Image (cartoon, coloured by chain):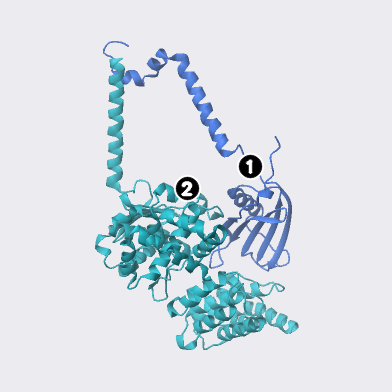
Chain colours: A blue, B cyan
Amino acid sequence: MSPGHSPELAILNPTSFFSRRPRLGLAHLLVFWLCVFGLSFAALGCHTIAPMRPVGIDQFSPEKDVLVFHISIEEPSTPRSYRDWAQAQLDLVGGEPRNRRYPEIPIYEVTYRFRVSREMVAEVTFRRGDDGEGALEHAQTVVRAVPEWLIKEESP
Amino acid sequence: MRQHALSQGVRVTQGVRLLGLGGLVLLLSGCGLFYNHTLSYEDFSLYGNQPKTTLRRTGDTIQDVFDAYRLLFPNFEEKVHGARILYEEDSLSQENIFTGDLRQEGFYLPVLDLIHLSPRRPRGDADDLSVILHEMAHHFLISAHSKTSSQYWLNEGLACCLEVSFFDEEGTLCTPLFHQSLFSQARRILRRDGEEKFRSELSALIGASWFHFHRSDGRNHNYAYSWSLYWHLLNQQEGSLEERVHAIIEMSPPEVLASIDGVISDLRTSADDHLAALSKDPDLRGWCLERWAELPAANGRRFRAALLEELDPERDPGPKSWARATLLINGRIRGISRQERNLLHRRVAKTLGSPDTDLNIRIAIAAALADEGSLSWAYIVPLINGLEEASGELRAASARALARLSKQKPTVVNPGFWRNAPPEIRAVEVAEWRNWYELRH
């Protein structure tokens, strides 16, 4: 350490740090980060959620201005992905889906029900404002608790 | 070495200074640095990230609870400090995405007079209220009787008794104190574990530490144990609620332990019997009816009698009572014969269809049918007539109810259409409904 060098600066100066313990510092840092990542993965159970893969879509029109879609998917997904997928479907038709039997009536409410093996896992609803005007907007997404048997085991 | 130690010392001092400065800034700013909005009320400051109007609504409810608790506990009042209340929603809830995960909905830190609320939506305002009532009960009790802060069974017992309270139509806080879900849970535990284990678990809670109460394996049952013990003790005392609460605080541990047989005896009595006793109070009858409907095997005869009393014209039931009755009659209440249920349907339908009925009651009934309607032909004609009424709200609610009741005939449910569309366009829909009814009959 050079004379007159402030002790605090010496500690904070990276060159002086590495000059004292060059290899050990890097190795420690590497091991530390590996441990952190390793523990994080262990805590999360290394579970990866696959992107949603619809295997079938059915449309129902219980009312003239209400549409309900039943979407069969292979396995449950994350809460936001249901909303995002439904929003993307709505965007595909310019946010204005139509009931084929009553094309002249604007749709008031659209619901997407997601099912895995006939078990409903989530429901996303878009609705116009209380005055019935404006664009269809996300009203709510309700994600049901997924039964254990619906969660596929990852093959080793 | 000495230089190294010196530099470490300087670093520690700097860190302490930085922490001190941070603490001072936080103290001076309250919690405002962390939240977008701060609302100041007479008795508390509310911090949150929600839009100000939403936060204001919650703040008003909290102030109502403060005011109501002041009336309930007039002698506590002078010792109750102002509180800091943090209102938080998780990021999913903010986006109106709701999951069924169980999580903590609030906690209270007595040292800082800090209440943290994170109610789950979309269960409704009633659930927000129950979390507020619960945490505020801790604040009132511990502020007035600081020694209770380490008596966890006593604190949670009172908070659970008060969290089932509700504001009636006049804005008065009604306190039934009977927590049906904790009662059922305690009964299940008693049935499963037997009296001996129940007694020993409950005894262990009397002097339990925070860690034992909130972190032990059986923590999920501790609220049920605490509520059942506290509720029993309250029922044993006489006087105002405040006097009874005070008497329980003054009880010695052996006195509390001596009452466990009474707790077991309370749990041996059915919820049906407890509700029947509570429903004699006209202020609590409506609340009891809702709890009754949640029972898997309710006594239909008692339920029906209480429901008819609730709808007694001499009581002049308002929109809330009629809406509740409509939901219950159309709901899953068991123990009522089909004939009795049909009579109740007709009674509601008659009120809905009568032009003499208060408009708000008619709208409330139609809105309740839209939520929980079951197909009874008694409702169809009043609802079709409702589509032609002068009130746009009644027309919109009737259309929604018809859509729910009749699965066969598609209609327009957009409330904007029924409120604002020209009469000649609405008339086409009404004519369709009338034709459909003619064909079905």
Q: Position of residue A32 (x, y in %)?
A: 49, 26
Same chain? Circles 1 and 2: no
The tag on residue B77 is none
Question: Which residue is outermost to the top?
Answer: A2
Identify the residue shown where x is 54% and y is 33%: A39
For the residue pair B167 and B52, the one nearer the viewer reads as B167
Label 2: how many residues lie within 10 Å, few (<14), some (14-19) or many (20+)?
few
Which residue position holds label 1? Answer: A49
Residue B31 in view here: yes
Q: Which chain contains the residue that carries disc 2?
A: B
Residue B366, picture quadrant: bottom right
Amino acid marked by disc 2: Ser
A33 displayed left or right of B39: right
Asked if the residue under mark 2 is in contact with the one under mark 1, i.e. CB atoms within 8 Å, the reply is no
Q: Position of residue B189 (x, y in %)?
A: 54, 59
Which residue position holds label 2? Answer: B216
Between marks 1 and 2 in the image, the one whose residue lies nearer the viewer: 2
Residue B391 in view here: no
Q: SS for tag 1?
A: loop
Spatial CA distance of label 1 from label 2 is: 32 Å
B115 displayed left or right of B354: left
The C terminus of chain A sits in image quarter: top right
Identify the residue shown where x is 55% and y is 54%: B97
